[in-house]
């Protein structure tokens, strides 16, 4: 595990402990839920467990019977919402490297009563699923945390079936951040320092083999030390 991954894992282990103790996301990381209250009521989980920057389950237009994978599933909200949308003939997987987050996700799964959700321990750059195993890859505010984003996007491409969809919420760099911010590991774990420009993200998707990448920035944040980041929705398709 790289140094940055260890910092990220420790940060999210602490966030999971806070959420388990009843604190919501506002004190533990980036958070802008965007979930419909009726969807949350149906799975019995509060949006307060989200550490995401959007709602990739809405972006993905999930259909009954589909298989979904969430990269960096955290407390499991997007996996459980996906499991509900794809129904009993479909399945939702979440992969996360942090034991405390996996434990929280299992406890939220038990509360939801959903059986078609599975949480796997692993890195998002080495997903423990075979090639072509899923119809849709989602992720919420996680790929920016990876030191090797090309490896993560290549892994998303590998696990998707031909014609499969990539539908991700993530943070991007809009105006160059100050060098001291880029070097700060706590800013990395807070979804700031690891962001890359929209055009770099598009090139990584194309280099992995994805087609028709679409990237839409839907909220902008000024970074006090200089520069701006944004919450973005990213969509692309694996050729059929
Ligand atoms: C900002 S939180 C987002 C959690 C969740 N997607 C959500 O929207 O609430 C980042 C999550 O990604 C996980 N994570 C970060 N880097 C990872 C990696 N390289 N491999 C696996 N999990 C990772 C962390 O453990 C944490 O649960």
Image (cartoon, rainbow, N blue to C red):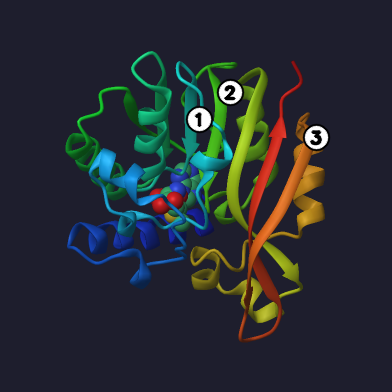
Q: Which residue is mark 1?
A: 127
Question: Badge 1 local density, few (<14 within 10 Å), some, or many (20+)?
Answer: many
Above or below, comparing residue 131 to residue 152 in the picture:
above
Q: Are marks 3 and 1 in contact (CB under 8 Å)?
A: no
Label 1 lies in ligand 1 vicinity (Cβ under 8 Å): no
Of residues 138 and 219, the one drawn nearer to the viewer in this rendering: 219
Is residue 238 left or right of 3 when viewed as pictured? right
Label 3: state its secondary structure.
strand
Residue 73 position, x and y percent, is 41, 43
Q: Decide if residue 161 is in sight here.
A: yes
Of residues 110 and 133, the one drawn nearer to the viewer in this rendering: 110
Q: Are marks 1 and 2 in contact (CB under 8 Å)?
A: yes
Is residue 160 left or right of 163 when viewed as pictured? left
Above or below, comparing residue 65 to residue 148 in the picture:
above
Quarter occupied by the C terminus? top right
Residue 171 occupies quadrant: bottom right
Residue 181 position, x and y percent, is 62, 77
Q: Earlier in the sequence, mark 3 or mark 1?
A: 1
Q: Which mark is residue 159?
A: 2
Residue 34 position, x and y percent, is 47, 56
Between the residue at mark 1 and the residue at mark 2, the CA separation in whole angstroms equals 8 Å
């Amino acid at each position: 595990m790289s140094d940055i991954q260890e910092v990220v894992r420790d940060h999210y282990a602490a966030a999971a402990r806070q959420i388990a103790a009843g604190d919501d996301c506002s004190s533990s990381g980036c958070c802008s839920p965007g979930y419909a209250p009726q969807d949350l009521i149906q799975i019995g989980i509060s949006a307060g467990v989200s550490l995401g920057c959007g709602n990739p389950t809405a972006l993905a237009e999930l259909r009954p019977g589909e298989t979904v994978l969430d990269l960096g599933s955290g407390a499991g909200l997007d996996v459980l919402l996906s499991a509900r949308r794809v129904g009993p003939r479909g399945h939702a997987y979440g992969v996360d490297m942090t034991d405390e987050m996996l434990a929280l996700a299992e406890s939220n799964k038990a509360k939801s009563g959903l059986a078609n959700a599975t949480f796997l321990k692993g890195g998002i750059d080495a997903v423990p699923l075979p090639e072509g195993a899923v119809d849709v890859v989602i992720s919420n505010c996680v790929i920016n945390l990876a030191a090797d984003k090309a490896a993560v996007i290549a892994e998303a491409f590998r696990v998707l079936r031909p014609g499969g969809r990539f539908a991700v919420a993530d943070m991007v760099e809009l105006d160059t951040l100050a060098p001291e911010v880029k070097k700060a590991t706590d800013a990395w774990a807070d979804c700031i320092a690891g962001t890359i420009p929209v055009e770099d993200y598009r090139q990584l998707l194309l280099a992995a083999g994805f087609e028709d990448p679409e990237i839409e920035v839907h909220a902008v944040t000024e970074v006090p030390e200089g520069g701006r980041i944004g919450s973005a929705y990213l969509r692309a398709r694996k050729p059929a």
